[in-house]
Image (spheres, helix red, strand yellow):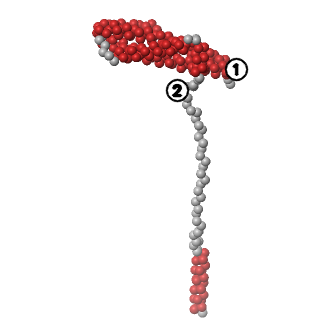
């Protein structure tokens, strides 16, 4: 009887062990292969084309006929001949001054150099007068633009107003370029004339120093009078 009980206990234990193992059997690893799919290529973004900059520093270009018509209307029929004449005089005087400054300046040359300085000053004054005319014409156009803009309601007004403003802005642009050319002429010649003035004062002895001192004093007084 005792042996039978022992056998029964052993059998029950074996069954329990088998059941436990079957419940904890390791799950086999998945044999599925991970496949990496290539991502579809994104379409290239189309860049917006920027407008090509206008030649000449971004300034709007106009036809030669437009420029001539605008300047003739603003400055008179002889503007082109006057511009060429003054520009040629400025360039010629610049060359003369630069060439003379490359040479020696002595007290004996005082009269010659003073005459060259006077001619440069007169040429610069002529160019400055033409510059003043160009400025006046440009300012008149700017005033007209401001007056129309001030009287125009928001939204740009009617087609006639917009067309008038557009035409005036073209005039303004052309006159600005014309004025800037005279400014460049005056500035260049003034620089060369100032170099000549200082060379006379430094290299032409006592006459040159007295002349230079008197000239600088007159210049100072004119500036004070202008305020």
Residue 40 visible to the viewer: yes
Please say if the residues under marks 2 and 1 sit with CB atoms less than 8 Å apart: no
Extreme residue in the right direction: 158
The residue sitting at 36% across, 12% down in the picture is: 197
The residue sitting at 60% across, 87% down in the picture is: 8
Q: Name the one closer to the observer, 224 or 191.
A: 191
Tell me which label, 2 or 1, sits earlier in the chain. Answer: 2
Residue 146 x, y percent position in the rendering: 61, 17
**Label 2 vs label 1, nearer the camera:** 2
Residue 101 x, y percent position in the rendering: 35, 16
Residue on which the image places disc 2: 56
Q: Is mark 1 on a helix, strand or loop?
A: helix
Q: Name the one closer to the observer, 108 or 151.
A: 108
The residue sitting at 58% across, 16% down in the picture is: 71
Q: In which quarter of the image is the N terminus?
A: bottom right
Q: Label 2 vs label 1: CA separation? A: 31 Å
Q: In this view, does 165 lie to the left or right of 110?
A: right
Sort mark 1 into few (<14), some (14-19) or many (20+) by Cα contacts within 10 Å. Answer: few
Residue 172 visible to the viewer: no
The residue sitting at 70% across, 22% down in the picture is: 159
Sort mark 2 into few (<14), some (14-19) or many (20+) by Cα contacts within 10 Å. Answer: few
Q: Name the one closer to the observer, 51 or 161.
A: 51
Residue on which the image places disc 1: 160
Residue 45 picture quarter: top right
Numbered badge on residue 48: none
Q: What element carries label 2?
A: loop
């Amino acid at each position: 009887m005792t042996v039978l009980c022992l056998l029964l206990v052993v059998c029950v234990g074996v069954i329990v062990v088998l059941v436990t193992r079957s419940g904890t059997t390791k799950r086999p690893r998945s044999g599925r292969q991970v496949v990496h799919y290539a991502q579809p290529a994104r379409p290239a973004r189309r860049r917006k084309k920027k407008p090509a900059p206008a030649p000449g520093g971004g300034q709007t270009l106009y036809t030669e006929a437009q420029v001539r018509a605008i300047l003739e209307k603003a400055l008179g029929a002889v503007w082109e001949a006057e511009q060429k004449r003054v520009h040629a005089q400025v360039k010629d005087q610049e060359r003369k001054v630069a060439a003379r400054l490359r040479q020696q300046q002595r007290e004996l040359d005082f009269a010659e150099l003073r005459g060259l300085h006077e001619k440069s000053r007169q040429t610069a004054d002529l160019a400055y007068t033409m510059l003043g005319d160009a400025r006046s014409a440009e300012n008149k156009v700017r005033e007209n633009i401001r007056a129309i803009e001030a009287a125009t309601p928001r939204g740009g007004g009617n087609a006639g107003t917009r067309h008038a403003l557009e035409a005036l802005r073209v005039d303004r642009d052309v006159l600005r370029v014309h004025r800037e050319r005279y400014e460049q002429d005056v500035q260049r010649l003034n620089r060369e004339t100032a170099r000549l003035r200082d060379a006379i004062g430094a290299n032409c002895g006592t006459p040159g120093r007295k002349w230079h001192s008197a000239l600088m004093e007159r210049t100072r007084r004119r500036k004070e009078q202008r305020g």
